[in-house]
Amino acid sequence: MIAVALSISKANPSDKPNESQFNNVIKKVGSFLKGDKDRLKINEGDIIAEVNGIPIYKNEFELRKGLTLASEGQVNDINNFVLSKLVREKVKEYLAMKYNLKVSEGEINSYLEKEKQQFKESPEVDKKLKELISASGMTYDEYWNDYEKYNVKRMLLFDKLYNTIINEGIKSGKLEKTDKMTVDTQNEYKKYVDSIIDQYVKQAKISINDKYKDMFKGFTRE
C-alpha cells in the first residue's frame, strides 16, 4: 500500500532508487481514490462475506482491490487474492477479540500525531504525501481521519496480537525469551505467529454472500 511506501521513504529520505515508479504509484492510487471516495466508508454497504461472524464489507474489499492494483500492478485472480488477504485479517481480528485486545481512539490519535510530526520533519516525503492527497481528491482531514486511521487501527491491533502470541509462546516454552533481538530471532518469532494464525485460518468459518459468489469462483483459503 502507499502508506507503506511513504513509511519507507520516511525512514530513508535520501534513498530514491525507484522515484519515478513511486510517483506513478501515487498517481494511480490518487486516481483510484478520486474515482469513488465512498470506498473510504469501510464499514458500510453490502457485506460480501463473513469470517467467524466478522463481516467483510464491499467497500473495504473494493478499497483494498484498487490499492493492490495501483501499487502492485496486475495480479492473477485479483478477487480471490484480495479476499484471501482480508480473510486472514478478519481471522486476526477474531483472535484479537478472543484475547480481548482493543485499540483505543487515544492510541490511534497518538500514533497519527507522531506520523504527522514525522512528515513535517521530512519535507521531501511530506511533499509526496501532499501530492497523494491532491491526486486523490481527499482533503487533508479525510486522509488522516479516514484513510490513514483505517491503516493505523489495523496495524496497532495486529501488533498487539503479535506481541500477545509471542508472550504466550515464551510462557509455554515454545519460544525462547531474549534480551537482544536478532534477525534470526525475529524470523523465528514471525514464523511462530504465522503458524498460529495459519491454524485459525484453516479452521475459520467462511461464508460468501450468494450475490457475490460468482466473483470468487475457485476461492481457497491460504
Image: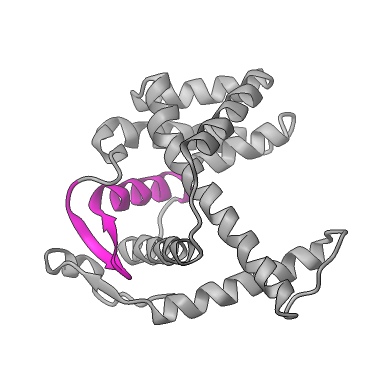
Judging depth in this view, the residue of 108 and 32 nearest the camera is: 108
Quadrant in the rendering for residue 195: bottom right
| Farthest-out residue, right | 180
* Colouring of the image: one colour
- Residue 31: say if magenta: no
Q: In this view, does 35 lie above or below 180?
A: above
The location of residue 196, given as percent across then percent down, is 56, 76
Q: In this view, does 136 lie above or below 108?
A: above
Quadrant in the rendering for residue 17: top right
The location of residue 157, given as percent across then percent down, is 52, 52
For residue 79, side relative to residue 158 (left or right): left
Quarter of the rendering occupied by the C terminus: bottom left
Judging depth in this view, the residue of 110 and 130 nearest the camera is: 110
- Residue 51: say if magenta: yes
The location of residue 45, given as percent across then percent down, is 18, 47
Quadrant in the rendering for residue 158: bottom right
- Segment tinted magenta in the rendering: 45-72
Residue 1 in view in this figure: no
| Farthest-out residue, front | 100
Q: Is residue 57 above or below residue 168?
A: above
Residue 201 in view in this figure: yes
